[in-house]
Amino acid sequence: MDGVVDGFWGAVGNTPLIRLRRASEATGCEILGKAEFMNPGGSVKDRAALGILKAAMAEGRLVPGQAGTIVEGTAGNTGIGIALAANALGWRSVIVVPETQSREKLDYLRMIGADLRLVPPKPASDPGHYVNVSRRLAEELGAVWANQFDNPANALAHEATTGPEIWDQTDGRVDAFTCACGTGGTLAGVARALKARKPGVRIVLADPGGSGLLDWVKTGTPKAEGSSITEGIGQAARAPGNLAQARDLIDDAVRIEDPAMLEQVFDLQMQEGISVGGSAGLNVAAAIRVARDLGPGHTVVTILCDGAARYQSKLFNPAFLRGRGLPTPPWMDAAG
């Protein structure tokens, strides 16, 4: 039957492009957001999860209906995608997450049956860093290590799906693409897909405070400054393998600080009815910056990574924001 898909695995992808009215009107451009929060696991990371698990199946390391375990270190969303995809085919998931991530994501992982392992936040070079812990756990359990940061199946999933969808949905009229990077899989995969079809399309990395990727793009060396309340994006010390392989396709990078990110999160929710998380707000702020640089009449596409409900205790908590010297909108102040 037309329009019927097969479970979680069939429901990932083919998300709509949403015209962002206020951003478009402010710049004279068409600014479009890929509604990745509409994936069944609620985020763009569902695509990476499927790409990684499909690659493991193709290599015979996981077999549907047979016992299998997948281990991953994640800020939360990739773990959610992996856990749901694993549930659908009878596998166990062990998800290692820094304990500083939002309560909502941690509760969701527990709710969907993931074996959640919380670890203190550590630098990437520390053996206690969540990625390093997940690698050791996979070795100890004899399990598949998803390794989203350096597993090429991550970027390949976006090259095969997200990029071509954007091209088709815009009828090829896309002038720039921008998004933030955690693993770099989304940016790398979409960049390869779009540049193969239109070499002149502009690819811009959006970076939060505390991340060194902007300097990596501009100078080749990461240099982290400042901080951010965003989760799952930015890298302080190195470019992950997925991103590094696409270095020659990235035309520029822009820094978006938390106040600009929050402005877009709150405006999208209250003015356009689009409820998204911090990384999506940062992406929209970056798309506006790129659109203004290009001038009126262009089309800029970005990623609406996930929904706001996963950050209620942070982004929508006035005490949390005020404690970090960040602005709160009038409607939030009125609500207490």
Image (spheres, rainbow, N blue to C red):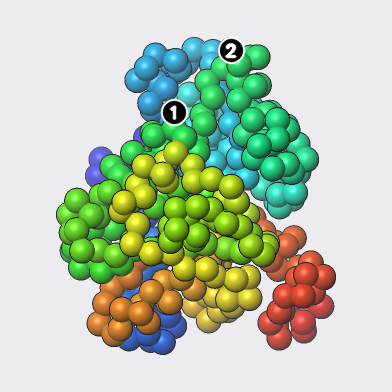
Residue at (63%, 54%) from the top-left corner? 231
Residue at (39%, 14%) from the top-left corner? 60
Q: Secondary structure at mark 1?
A: helix
Q: Whole-percent x and y of residue 245?
A: 36, 42
* Callout 1–callout 2 Cβ contact below 8 Å: no
**Displayed quadrant of residue 29:** bottom left
Residue 139 as seen in the image, left or right of residue 35? right
Residue at (63%, 14%) from the top-left corner? 141
Q: Nearer the viewer, residue 220 or 281?
A: 220
Q: Nearer the viewer, residue 290 or 145?
A: 290
Residues at marks 1 and 2, CA–CA distance in whole angstroms: 16 Å
Tell me: residue 134, above or below residue 4. above
Tell me: residue 74, above or below residue 334. above
Numbered disc in front, either 1 or 2: 2
The amino acid on which the numbered mark 1 sits, given as a three-letter code, is: Leu
Quarter of the picture containing the C terminus is bottom right
Q: Whole-percent x and y of residue 25?
A: 38, 86
Residue 267 as seen in the image, left or right of residue 322? left
Residue 298 as seen in the image, left or right of residue 24? left
For residue 285, the mark is none
For disc 1, the marked residue is 53
For residue 142, the mark is 2
Q: Nearer the viewer, residue 105 or 321?
A: 321
Q: Residues within 10 Å of mark 2 (few under 14, many from 20)?
A: few
Q: Whole-percent x and y of residue 192?
A: 28, 49
The amino acid on which the numbered mark 2 sits, given as a three-letter code, is: Gly
Tell me: residue 98, above or below residue 94. below
Could you tell which of marks 1 and 2 lies nearer the N-terminus? 1
